[in-house]
Image (cartoon, rainbow, N blue to C red):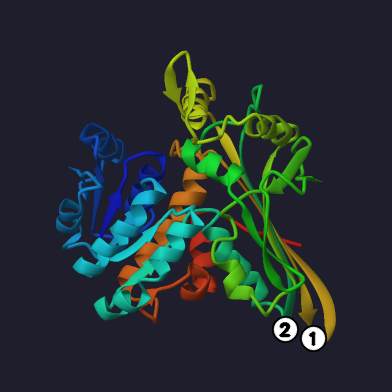
């Protein structure tokens, strides 16, 4: 198999690492970025002859199509707004394609390419990172263990091991993705119906062993296609983001002040977008490469063998000092790598543009996570 990784940031690095070191069936990896030096650095750090660096402008459709040809699958680790055109290039070149996603509208547009992907005899699977991503497959994995599923509650967070004020948070993925999660509406199932709720609301506290006080609150994107998948089959479905206690109140104050607005305002005769200023300040002032944790909890309620049962999946992953990979890189990039390989191997029986929870064999996926020491603790 030959796999293309688009984007040589943290997640592209994580995907390339997994393809080289955890994936014996992969024969060659291409990592490509607009900044060729960045791609070269990743290739040099991985330091294996199976990986090569290329320069690519992902906004150049013809160049992307040319690079995709000859690869069995491509993984997009670039900003979500490129993923629709990248999907179209994948269809043209008959290259299986997945991405880290994170935007409901883009994912829906990709899934609308189902007929074209079927004709090309390939898979297009959006939203294959952590959340949306891995947790969607885990949701299906847990639901399959019940005769009837009634509720699924998903909680996920990336946290610094050494939190620092004012936000007790570090930038471990795109700042644009972070702001989107906090300002766009969240999609849930309530009383058996799909509904939208405001992000940064429905605050709750939760506990993980050996961690200080934690909070969780509604954010956008995490449920991805799960509301459609489970509509008519479940009463309650939601997703909340985990942070250290106090984070939500502080960030919501900035939102309420208009600092996440994309509308222009004039300051000293200069037109600026508050969101652009906030993005720059967050990138300037928040840490980004310090040791981290990823916390995942899925809670299921349903019927099994005539009785109501509850099931909980917990995952606590942490920065890997041996490989220098963050927990967020492992839990975001590794799942995308696993899915890219499943597509390339032909392990996904039905071709087309499909939500991952419907396309992926959940048992195989969980086994691949465990092989990478991403382990579910059940209770």
Q: Residue at x 49, y 35 (%)?
A: 263
Instruction: Please report the residue visible at 34 percent of the width from the left and 51 percent of the height from the top.
Output: 82
Q: Residue at x 68, y 79 (%)?
A: 233
Task: Please indicate whether residue 113 sits to the left or right of residue 365 in the image.
Answer: left
Q: Quadrant of residue 339?
A: bottom left
Marks 1/2: CA distance?
7 Å
Work out whether 68 lies above or below 16.
Answer: below
Mark closer to the chain start, 1 or 2: 2
> Is disc 1 in contact with disc 2, using a CB cutoff of under 8 Å?
yes
Residue 305's label in the rendered image is 1
Furthest-bottom residue in this view: 306
- Residue 200, image x, y percentages: 69, 43
Horizontal relation, residue 120 to residue 349: left or right: left
User: In this view, which residue lies farthest toward the top?
Assistant: 268
The residue identified by callout 2 is 147
User: Is the residue 51 above or below the residue 128 in the image?
Assistant: above
274 vs 84, nearest the viewer: 274
Q: Quadrant of the C terminus?
A: bottom right
User: Where residue 211 sits: x, y (%)?
Assistant: 74, 38
Q: Nearer the viewer, residue 8 or 47?
A: 8
Provide the secondary structure element on which disc 1 rests: loop
Q: Secondary structure at mark 2?
A: loop
């Amino acid at each position: 198999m030959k796999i293309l990784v688009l984007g040589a940031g943290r997640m592209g690095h994580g995907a390339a690492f997994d393809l080289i070191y955890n994936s014996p069936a992969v024969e060659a990896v291409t990592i490509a970025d607009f900044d060729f030096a960045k791609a070269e650095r990743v290739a040099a750090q991985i330091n294996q002859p199976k990986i090569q660096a290329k320069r690519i402008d992902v906004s150049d459709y013809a160049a992307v199509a040319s690079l995709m040809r000859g690869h069995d699958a491509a993984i997009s680790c670039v900003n979500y707004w490129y993923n629709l055109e990248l999907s179209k290039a994948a269809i043209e070149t008959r290259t299986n394609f997945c991405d880290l996603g994170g935007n409901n509208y883009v994912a829906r547009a990709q899934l609308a390419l189902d007929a074209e992907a079927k004709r090309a005899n390939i898979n297009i699977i959006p939203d294959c990172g952590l959340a949306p991503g891995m947790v969607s497959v885990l949701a299906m994995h847990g639901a399959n263990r019940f005769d009837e599923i009634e509720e699924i509650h998903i909680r996920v967070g990336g946290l610094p091991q050494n939190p620092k004020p004012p936000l007790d948070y570090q930038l471990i993925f795109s700042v644009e993705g972070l702001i989107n999660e906090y300002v766009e509406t969240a999609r849930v199932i309530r009383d058996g119906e799909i509904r939208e709720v405001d992000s940064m609301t429905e605050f709750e506290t939760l506990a993980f062993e050996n961690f200080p006080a934690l909070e969780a609150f509604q954010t956008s994107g995490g449920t991805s296609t799960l509301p459609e998948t489970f509509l008519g089959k479940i009463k309650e479905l939601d997703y909340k983001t985990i942070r250290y206690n106090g984070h939500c109140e502080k960030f919501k104050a900035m939102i309420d002040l208009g600092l996440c607005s994309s509308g222009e305002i004039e300051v000293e005769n200069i037109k600026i977008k508050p969101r652009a200023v906030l993005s720059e300040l967050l990138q300037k002032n928040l840490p980004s490469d310090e040791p981290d944790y990823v916390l995942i909890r899925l809670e299921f309620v349903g019927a099994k063998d005539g009785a109501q049962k509850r099931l909980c999946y917990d995952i606590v992953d942490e920065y890997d000092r041996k490989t220098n990979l963050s927990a967020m890189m492992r839990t975001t990039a590794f799942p995308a790598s696993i899915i890219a390989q499943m597509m390339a191997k032909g392990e996904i029986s039905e071709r087309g543009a499909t939500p991952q929870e419907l396309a992926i064999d959940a048992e195989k996926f969980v086994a691949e996570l465990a092989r990478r020491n991403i382990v579910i603790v059940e209770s």
